[in-house]
Amino acid sequence: MATSYPDRTNARGIWTLSDITKNIKTEGTFPDGSTRGLFNIGKPPDVDPVVTVEYVTIETTGNSVDFGDLSEGRNQNCSFGSFTRSIFAGGDPGPSVSNTIDYIQSSSLGNAADFGNLTSVRRGIGSSGNNTRGLFGGGATPTNSNIIDYITITSLGNATDFGDLSTAAMGIQNSQVNSTTRGLFAGFNDPGPATNVIDYVTIATTGNGVDFGDTTDARSQPAGICSSTRGIWAGGTEDATNGVIDSVTISSLGNAVDFGDLTTVSQHPGGMSSLIRGVFSGCDPGTAVIEYITIASAGNAADFGDCTQAGQGSGNSNGHGGLDVFDPRAPELYSPTGFPLASGGGVGDIALSLAGTAANRIEVFTVSTLGNTEDFGDLVIPTETGASVGSSTRAVVGGGYDPSADTDTIQYVQFSTKGNAADFGNRTNSVQNVGGASNETRGMFAGGETVNVVDYITIATIGNATDFGNLSANRAAPSGLASTTRALFAGGYEPSRVDTVDYFTIGSTGNSSDFGNLSAVRSQMGTAASSTRGVVAGGGSPSLVNIIEYFTIGSTGNATDFGDLTDARSTMKGSGNNSTRAVFCGGLDPSASNIMDYVTIGSTGNAADFGDLIAATAQINGVQSNGHGGLD
């Protein structure tokens, strides 16, 4: 998908520097104007480490709220954040030290998923990074280490060697002090008493830490926060906890200067920041205090609120100084005037092809513009014959084959942010050949091999599926579509192919009702819907067919002839569609195909060529868009 607004790399013709500046600084629309800080409670007093992650909105004050859980409870872990992801790594879950890296989609709620592993098990690690790369520095393994390793935040995988700190150390600050280009580490314990060492690295390169200067006093395990220009460390310990806050100018070299004091002496606090405000959560010896400072103005911290429980943990945010303030604009989704292209029924125009044939590739295209797909990211695990549902902001894949066994996994991505999928939760069963349909609020997964089960999720809220009701019979490979109020599931096999069409009222729960029939028995069709009309295309009957038919969703009755696909094929699952156009992608014809063809939903007639998928793909989990007919 081409960039849809001008910047200095692509401006041409009538676009001028004034257009570019206005687009970026004046008319640009940002996600929601708030910064979310996340922290792991870590180790409450006198108990084992806990998995709890909580969050605050940094621009406001108030108590923290539960976010979800890490994969394991940890003491002395580290964390950092990009615009979209929150990373937690290493630490001491007891009885041994961990090398686990977890990640969370910071704009949502829910539990962490596995990212990969550090190059070695460590606790007391420092962290730093920007929107692209995250760094881990030092730590104890159990002996002190000078290791620096890094990850690319938008991908999944194990950390890679970056270089070495100037000295082996643990107790480095457990949260970020960095600009978009430079990362700082401080709070060294080498290996006995705390030191005042500050090292820095250039994030985009690899190499060893370089001397920056000294903190105002020797300490280990302070919290770090930053704006784009100023780095701040607060608390920490040298034999006894302290409440000192000091600061540096990140782009220079030199010693830290006194900033003020915390309201309470703190070791192991977690740090979170916007470009304006720094927030410190929890501490050792075990309090639940949250306090804040204004980064640009030296002075003492003030009360922010409280954690749900006392603890010593690590924190991060999606708005700290390592992030380019204009970066979250997701330029591929924005218009030349700087205003975002709207999403939802009638206006959404972005579509995702959600993997298949044991691949994990997600591809993206614009429904209104003919052309080939581009790479979007990857599913957490490769699946095929699952089902997809989606809202105007999120696409979700549930169930399928993974490729060694049937799975109950549910995964999701945000339309506005290219990148890999994250864990959503689990279905009520593990089956393949599932059907999916959704409106803005609720996504339904129906049928599958030898079952009539229908379960549902609330798309905006991460969690497990809940029982909805049943299809009229055990049925595999039903093809789903929806209006804002009604979901239809057409065809499939039970075990012979059928022409049955069932429907549900999405806002309630219960069993299906009879809608009508297809013109012939079929399974594994492509589907699309406007707010009033549902379209089904292709399928196996048992031979492959190119038939396209349609229904008026608000009534009941049999399918009516629409036209033909450009070739006979099946296993397309859904379509990329807006209110006027449906694009049917891939499938079997009889081998895996990269064909994309389209129809105008409101008329009748044969399909025409749209473009090509990146690679031939069959058994697609679904093609989902942010403008289908189920959306308001």
Image (cartoon, grey):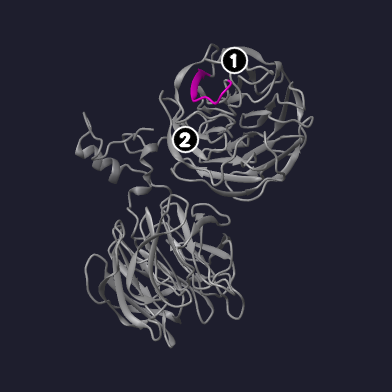
Outermost residue, bottom side: 239
Q: Is residue 16 visible?
A: yes
Observer-nearest residue: 368 or 357?
Answer: 357
Mark 2 = which residue?
Answer: 363
Task: Kindly indicate the quadrant of the structure image that contains residue 264.
Answer: bottom left
What amino acid is at disc 1? Asn
- Above or below, 95 against 474 in this view is below
Q: How many labels does the image show?
A: 2
Looking at the picture, how far across and down is residue 272, in whole percent? Answer: 42, 65
- Above or below, 323 against 310 in this view is above
| Mark 1 secondary-structure assignment | loop
**At x 74% / y 39%, what residue is drawn?**
509
**At x 49% / y 55%, what residue is drawn?**
106
Looking at the picture, how far across and down is residue 435, in whole percent? Answer: 66, 33
What amino acid is at disc 2? Glu
Determine if the magenta segment contains residue 202: no
- In which quadrant will I find the N terminus? top left
Determine if the magenta segment contains residue 596: yes
| Mark 2 secondary-structure assignment | strand
- Above or below, 510 against 550 in this view is below
Q: Residues within 10 Å of mark 1 (few under 14, many from 20)?
A: many
Mark 1 = which residue?
Answer: 546
Q: How far apart are marks 2 and 1 (CA)?
A: 24 Å
Closer to the chain start, of discs 2 and 1, is 2
Decide: marks 2, 1 in contact (CB < 8 A)?
A: no
Q: Give the range drawn in magenta.
A: 590-600
| Side of 107 relative to 500 (left or right) | left
Looking at the picture, how far across and down is residue 373, in whole percent? Answer: 43, 30
